[in-house]
Amino acid sequence: MERKICSACLLGVNCRWDGKKKPNEKVMEIARKEFLIPICPEQLGGLSTPREPAVILGKKVFTRDSGKDITENFVRGSLQTLLIAKVFGVKKAILKQRSPSCGSGKIYDENRNIIPGNGITAERLQKEGIEVISEEDLL
């Protein structure tokens, strides 16, 4: 059976920046039929839940309100996610769109505008040949 990694928030885990969950019905339906491995790159990178929202500015990640550089946490989380993907032979990932970790093709800027770009984890997985699908891309 093909294994995929999946943003844990899409599976109903309370790991979002605001400490809430955001289960996605399409993802939950897939989870009933396929083997999805829940991951939260921000938690894997050592950030707490809840936490201040983050934004990508250039190649760095900062907390949106206080401006603290948390790039190292995001990089660490992306590396841990990649390790999990490799251990399980994952070829695809279902990740939360617009997230500074998981967004693929769309992320938020510091003013909460949607802009083109990839989150840190999505970018790393794509560079390693893992197909990244957002919950918005599911049929």
Image (cartoon, rainbow, N blue to C red):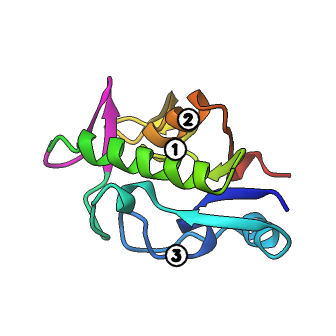
Q: Is residue 136 above or below residue 1?
A: above
Which amino acid type is shown beneath numbered disc 2? Lys
The residue pinned by badge 3 equals: 13
> Is residue 20 toward the left or the right of residue 93 in the image?
left
Name the secondary structure under disc 3.
Answer: loop
Q: Using a 10 Å C-alpha cutoff, classify the residue at mark 2 as few (fewer than 14 neighbours), some (14 to 19) or many (20 or more).
A: some
Give the number of callouts: 3
Q: Which residue shows up at 71% across the image and 46% down it?
A: 92
Mark 2 or mark 3: whose residue is earlier in sequence: 3
* 85 vs 53, nearest the viewer: 85
Instruction: Tell me the chief SS of the magenta region.
Output: strand
> Is residue 72 toward the left or the right of residue 40 in the image?
left
Q: Using a 10 Å C-alpha cutoff, classify the residue at mark 3 as few (fewer than 14 neighbours), some (14 to 19) or many (20 or more).
A: some
The residue pinned by badge 2 equals: 106
Q: CA distance from mark 2 to mark 3?
A: 22 Å
Quadrant of the rendered image containing residue 43: bottom left
Q: Are marks 1 and 3 in contact (CB under 8 Å)?
A: no
Q: Which mark is residue 98?
A: 1
Location of residue 46 in the rendering, given as x and y in whole percent from the top left corner: 28, 60
Location of residue 11 in the rendering, given as x and y in whole percent from the top left corner: 62, 71
Which residue sits furthest front? 87
Mark whose residue sits in front, 2 or 3: 3
Which amino acid type is shown beneath numbered disc 1? Arg
Q: CA distance from mark 2 to mark 1?
A: 5 Å
Q: Are marks 2 and 1 in contact (CB under 8 Å)?
A: yes
Q: Which residue shows up at 50% across the image and 73% down it?
A: 21
For the N terminus, the quadrant is bottom right
Mark 1 or mark 3: whose residue is earlier in sequence: 3
Mark 2 or mark 1: whose residue is earlier in sequence: 1
Location of residue 119 in the rendering, given as x and y in whole percent from the top left corner: 47, 38
Looking at the rendering, the stretch of residues picked out in magenta corresponds to: 54-66
Quadrant of the rendered image containing residue 129: top right
